[in-house]
Image: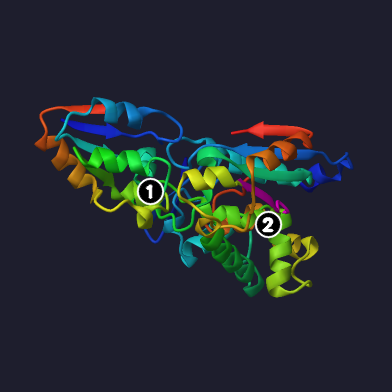
């Protein structure tokens, strides 16, 4: 268990820094989570994070990296639906880092 | 007496044992997986309807909704929320839980 | 999930998951789903079979707001993206429960118990939940 502090509020996370309650998420918190991952959020980063939020909304699951790559390719085109592009944005793993910033739980099967 | 059944009738015989031991005029409340007994058109619906001729059968609405079967309930089964569950427990001198 | 796990180049086996429990009263259904999702990384030939109360796992219109549990039924619709596309439902199980194919949240193949029996015979590994 951990917490992140933002605007004087303290938000609960698990021991790896994923939000405990997905409902706590907002864009300020995402910014704070990104900082803890040393990621400077650009429009391209937000695009992936927003995609993950929508994906979770629909399927109630954080996708595995293979599935995320495929799904992004379908929605945003092949130049974005590939590991190289996603790893450039999220060097420590798109599923892991982007999910954390999106306020999602750690992807199932992510060791 | 109030009887509660929380197991699916398709998996365990709790519902049938309850029916066999519930006296006329009893209240029978289906909760958790027990609410599957409330589905119209299942192999248990006739037994439930038969029980309804001597007892009042209730089902917990939240459990029906969670399981996607709230729209398929046998006519005459009374839906209750948690407050209704508490009321039923208070209205009866004894509660028997068929687990 | 690590990419390395998929590069073993091992042989593909037929895996079948049998689902027999209703979704919220016990943890079996959710556990099975998680194992399927994790196992999908190994790119095997996966089938899911729903018999007995397992058919209740994939009923449409589940809304768990009132019982404070997570509604994981939408996740079955994500299975296709994990290349888990073979979902079989036993006709007898549906009929006994007053359900039909239209009541299900995912596209499935409805089969008789005899057909499912034959399907099981073809499997290399059968996991029961």
Q: Nearer the viewer, residue B7 or C43?
A: B7
The image quarter in which residue C123 lies: top right
Marker disc for residue C80: 2
A61 vs B4, nearest the viewer: B4
Residue at image coords 40%, 52%: B69
Q: Position of residue B27 (x, y in %)?
A: 18, 37
Q: Are marks 2 and 1 on the same chain?
A: no
Relative to the observer, which residue lies in front, A75 or B92?
A: B92
Q: Position of residue C57 (x, y in %)?
A: 51, 46
- Magenta segment, which residues? C83-89
Name the side, left or right, on which A26 lies relative to C11.
left
Q: Residue at x 46, y 45 (%)?
A: C97
Q: Nearer the viewer, mark 2 or mark 1?
A: 1
**Residue in the image at 46% along x and 55% along y:** A22
Up-down: is B43 above or below B3?
below
Q: In the image, C90: left or right of A27?
A: right
Q: Chain of mark 2?
A: C
- Is residue C84 a member of the stretch shown in magenta? yes
Residue C26, x across and y down, in percent: 46, 35
Tell me if residue A100 is in the magenta stretch. Answer: no
Numbered mark located on residue B8 in the image: none
* Number of callouts: 2
Please indicate, yes or no, whether residue A91 appears anywhere in the rendered image.
no
The residue lying at 36 percent from left, 58 percent from top is: B71
Residue B9 quadrant: top left
Residue B13 placement (x, y as % from top left): 39, 28
Answer left or right for C10 relative to B39: right
Whether residue B50 can be seen here: yes
Q: Which mark is residue B39?
A: 1
């Amino acid at each position: 268990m951990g917490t992140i502090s933002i605007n004087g509020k303290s938000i609960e996370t698990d021991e790896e820094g994923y939000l405990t309650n997905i409902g706590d998420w907002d864009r300020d918190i995402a910014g704070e989570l990104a900082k803890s991952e040393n990621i400077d959020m650009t429009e391209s980063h937000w695009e992936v994070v927003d995609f993950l939020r929508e994906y979770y909304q629909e399927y109630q699951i954080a996708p595995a990296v293979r599935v995320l790559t495929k799904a992004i390719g379908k929605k945003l085109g092949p130049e974005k639906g590939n590991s190289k592009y996603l790893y450039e944005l999220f060097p420590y793993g798109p599923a892991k880092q982007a999910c954390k910033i999106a306020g999602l739980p750690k992807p199932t099967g992510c060791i | 007496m109030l009887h509660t059944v929380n197991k699916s009738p398709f998996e365990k015989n709790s519902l049938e044992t309850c029916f066999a031991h519930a006296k006329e005029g009893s209240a029978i409340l289906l909760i958790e997986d027990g609410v599957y007994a409330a589905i119209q058109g299942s192999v248990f619906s006739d037994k439930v309807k038969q029980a309804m001729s001597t007892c009042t059968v209730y089902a917990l609405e939240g459990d029906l909704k969670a399981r996607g079967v709230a729209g398929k309930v046998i006519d005459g089964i009374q839906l209750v929320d948690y407050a209704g569950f508490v009321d039923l427990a208070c209205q009866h001198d004894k509660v028997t839980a068929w687990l | 999930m690590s990419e390395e796990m998929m590069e073993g180049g091992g042989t593909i086996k037929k895996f079948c998951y049998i689902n027999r429990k209703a979704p919220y009263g016990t943890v079996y259904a959710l556990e099975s789903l998680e194992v399927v999702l994790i196992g999908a990384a190994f790119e095997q030939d996966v089938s899911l079979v729903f018999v007995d109360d397992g058919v209740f796992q994939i009923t449409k219109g589940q809304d768990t707001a009132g019982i404070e549990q997570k509604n994981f039924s939408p996740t079955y619709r994500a299975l296709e993206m994990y290349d888990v596309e073979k979902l079989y439902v036993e006709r007898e199980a549906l009929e006994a429960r007053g359900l039909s194919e239209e009541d299900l949240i995912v596209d499935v193949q409805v089969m008789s118990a005899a057909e499912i029996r034959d399907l099981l015979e073809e499997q290399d590994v059968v996991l029961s939940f």
